[in-house]
Amino acid sequence: MTAPIPTTIKLQKTSRSLRLGYADGREFVLPAEYLRVLSPSAEVRGHGKPILQTGKQEVGLTGVETAGRYALKLVFDDGHDSGLYTWAYLYQLATEQETRWQHYLDQLHTAGASRDPHTSAIRLLP
């Protein structure tokens, strides 16, 4: 089965999110932070060993471009603009948002890291 292609794509700079609408009437709002920390780029995926993204709570989207007929290229205000979000990956991010977000929060907790760009976690060893 082929992933559905959004019929509407709206960059919402004020709320720092991307709104996707589908032909079946479903709509999803994906926060910029969520999209940034789960970027499909090599910088984030780490060539098989994912690199935990921290301090991205205030990141915003500044641009959205189509990449052929199969993906979007998202431009973030922290300078990140690599990685193509295929229609299939965007749909997974949309439909699995709660689970994926909780997994990310759990990873942050385990690492003693923060979403807040103004917080630097220091782990003291016993």
Image (tube, rainbow, N blue to C red):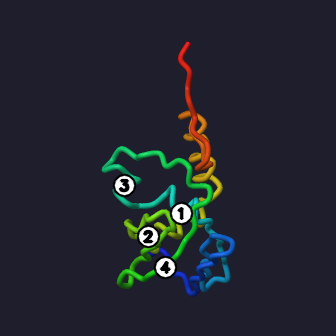
Q: Which residue is mark 2?
A: 85
Outermost residue toward the top in this view: 126
Residue found 61% across the figure and 68% down from its top: 30
Q: Which residue is mark 1?
A: 35
Please name the residue shown 35% across and 49% down the image.
46
User: Quick one: label 1 or label 3, which is nearer the N terminus?
Assistant: 1
Query: Which of the two discs, 2 and 4, sits closer to the camera?
Result: 4
What residue is rendered at 40% in x and 46% in y?
50
Numbered circle sitting on residue 61: none
The first of marks 2 and 3 along the sequence is 3
Residue 113: image quadrant is top right
Q: How dense is the environment of label 3, judged by Cα within 10 Å: few (below 14), some, or many (20 and up)?
A: some
Q: Can you tell which of label 2 and label 3 is closer to the viewer?
A: 3
Q: Position of residue 73 (x, y in %)?
A: 42, 74
The residue that label 3 is drawn on is 43
Element at label 1: helix
- The relative height of residue 77 versus residue 24 in the rendered view (above or below) is above
Q: For mark 2, give the secondary structure.
A: strand
The amino acid type, in three-letter code, at marker 4 is: Val
